[in-house]
Amino acid sequence: MKTSLFLYNSFSRIKEVFKPLDKKNIRMYVCGPTVYDRAHIGNARPVLVFDILFRLLRYLYGEDNVTYVRNITDIDDKINAKALQSGVNIESITEETIEWFHKDMDFLGALRPNYEPRATAYVSQMIEMITKLTSLSFAYPTEDGHVFFEVERFADYGRLSNKKLGELNEGVRIENEDSKRNPLDFVLWKPSTNEEPGWDSPWGKGRPGWHIECSAMAKDILGEQFDIHGGGIDLIFPHHENEIAQSTCSNDMKKFANFWLHNGFLKIEGEKMSKSLNNFLTVFDLIKRDFSASAIRYNMLSTHYRQPLDWKFERLAEAEKTLIKWNNKKESRNEVDLPKQVLNALLDDINTPLSIYEMHQLYKNEKFADLNKACAFFGFVPKGRKDHLPISPELSKKVNNLIKDRNNARLSKNFLLADKIREDLLGAGIIIKDSGQETTWELSTNLEIKKLKEL
Ligand SMILES: [Zn+2]
């Protein structure tokens, strides 16, 4: 590794030198989407911010030494409400939304995480964690089938959001007030009616609360302790506070994540984005308006990730012009080797606006080769070019080679082998499409990077 990476840790509220728990396996967890609607530009912000951090960690420690997990919340009351209101079943809604999410984020050139666990696949691990919390008296079941975490039992509760219990109590949404011991106690498990999705549990048929999803999935994939936990600033309280409480108390009081990183809010033309103001902007809207992925990335990264971002179309148009100017000086685009000034900016708490400033300087000083290398790192490619691979170039080469092997097997009438290769790829999340002489491939909604690497 070249120099030290400094990251602002929301937990300690200072910039700290990043020291991985294991240099050979740096682990990062970021809270992902709840899948019931198209991703808006505010949802795209953490995806792009943590995409840059993922790229930076891979650059510093090696591609195979970073594990990135971003969950998919496919159990949620908003999904149930949409199913009820639209008459479409829950699986169809979540499957379709996951497909949209992948298409939109692939378009933006965000690398796919190594794991994208879905809550529905981890209910047994959640039940196990809740059982442990109740047996240790950190949580209590109620007669009506709820299980609550008792915040007063965890001395560090409020540490991430820097608030005392009394302060947090103000303005907390009162739910199931009757059965809770403290209004801040939060739900780990709740009963389901026959119309709602439900799983059998020691507390009757029900479903998990949102917070326990992340604690259980992070533990299952990354272990009890890992390096970085990220998400939007709005998740600090209560979501991340609650994740810390659950995980710490069920993991023998071990520290959960070492670093907590949060990106700031996003506004549109100075206004808060909301359906009522009619300024709700989805990534798909931007794609339909023919903005390039690079310009969207550039615009998003022009503001430091911790600052509030004001999304302005004027700036997006300027970004498009800048990238055209830079791309006219295009030399080799494949080599990712960060020029010193750009790297130094990134090492200082992912200072992307400073990196972009340095890229302008490189242009001004006619250092075009360096500029191109930085562009490759940031995923800034000429408009209309399809270099936005959601998987690494190495993996995509691997897929192409396997497809060649398969086509050769077919030519020599070894259909058993040909089918096996197709099945193996499908199992890892790669769909092969034959049309005439040509074979193309695309990613399914169940891409599994680990399986793909092992093929
Ligand atoms: Zn989470």
Image: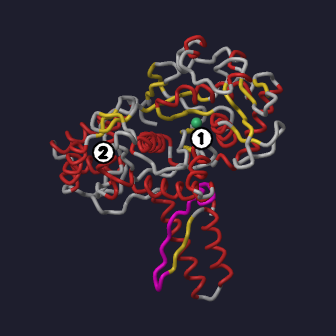
Q: Does residue 447 belong to the magenta stretch?
A: yes
Q: Can see residue 447?
A: no
Q: Quadrant of the C terminus?
A: bottom right
Q: Position of residue 237 (x, y in %)?
A: 54, 25
Q: Quadrant of residue 291?
A: bottom left
Residue 180, label in figure: none
Q: Which residue corresponds to mark 1?
A: 25
Q: Residues within 10 Å of mark 1 (few under 14, many from 20)?
A: some
Q: Does residue 375 belong to the magenta stretch?
A: no
Q: Quadrant of residue 425?
A: bottom right
Q: Which residue corresponds to mark 2?
A: 298
**CB of mark 1 near ligand 1 (< 8 Å):** no
The boundaries of the magenta stretch are: 435-452
Q: Is residue 357 left or right of residue 30?
A: left
Q: Position of residue 284 (x, y in %)?
A: 39, 55
Q: Residue at x 39, y 39 (%)?
A: 274
Q: Is residue 315 left or right of residue 186?
A: left
| Circles 1 and 2: CB atoms closer than 8 Å | no
Q: CA distance from mark 1 to mark 2?
A: 29 Å
Q: Residue at x 23, y 42 (%)?
A: 315
Query: SS at mark 1?
Result: loop
Q: Position of residue 334 (x, y in %)?
A: 35, 57
Q: Position of residue 267 (x, y in %)?
A: 34, 35
Q: Is residue 411 left or right of residue 123?
A: left
Judging depth in this view, the residue of 324 and 421 nearest the camera is 324
Q: Earlier in the sequence, mark 1 or mark 2?
A: 1
Q: Amino acid at mark 1?
A: Asn
Closer to the observer: label 1 or label 2?
2
Judging depth in this view, the residue of 202 and 294 nearest the camera is 202
Q: Is residue 267 above or below residue 394?
A: above
Q: Residues within 10 Å of mark 2 (few under 14, many from 20)?
A: many
Q: Quadrant of ligand 1?
A: top right
